[in-house]
Image (cartoon, helix red, strand yellow):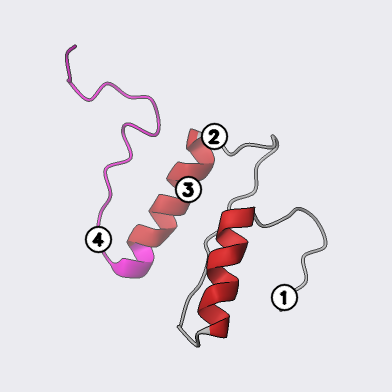
Amino acid sequence: MPRFDEGAIGVVSRQILLYAITAKIPAFILLAETKEMNPGPKANAGILKVLGKILNFDIDLAYCHGKDRGLSA
């Protein structure tokens, strides 16, 4: 297992990764560094941006950045 000098992998992410390793399922986790305990929209948007590059497709991140999507209540 990789060793991290700082931080921690969330419980759910860790359990999914450990299950995949045990079941010999190819898997990876994208992690984002945050200053707070709970990741915010910027960290989530960063992960989605990397995922889009890996999978070669565009993801509209306007909502993650708090931009108006033209939706009305």
Residue that numbered label 2 is attached to: 40
Residue that numbered label 3 is attached to: 46
Q: Is residue 44 above or below residue 8?
A: above
Q: CA distance from mark 3 to mark 4?
A: 14 Å
Residue 9 shown left or right of residue 28 in the figure? right
Dot placed on the residue nearer the N-terminal end, 4 or 2: 2
Is residue 31 at least partly visible in the picture?
no
Residue that numbered label 1 is attached to: 2
Q: Are marks 3 and 4 in contact (CB under 8 Å)?
A: no
Looking at the rendered image, the disc whose residue lies closer to the viewer, 4 or 2, is 2
Residue 2 shown left or right of residue 14 in the figure? right
Residue at screen point 56% across, 70% down: 17
Q: Is residue 25 above or below residue 7?
A: below
Where residue 57 is drawn, which disc sits there?
Answer: 4
* x and y percentages locating residue 40 in the rendered image: 54, 34
Q: CA distance from mark 2 to mark 1?
A: 25 Å
Dot placed on the residue nearer the N-terminal end, 1 or 3: 1
Dot placed on the residue nearer the N-terminal end, 2 or 3: 2
For badge 3, the amino acid type reads Gly
Residue at screen point 19% across, 11% down: 73
Q: Are marks 2 and 3 in contact (CB under 8 Å)?
A: no
Residue at screen point 39% across, 60% down: 51
Q: Are marks 4 and 2 in contact (CB under 8 Å)?
A: no
Based on the picture, tell me whether residue 10 belongs to the magenta stretch.
no
Looking at the rendered image, the disc whose residue lies closer to the viewer, 1 or 3, is 1
* x and y percentages locating residue 5 in the rendered image: 82, 62
In the image, the segment drawn in magenta is 53-73
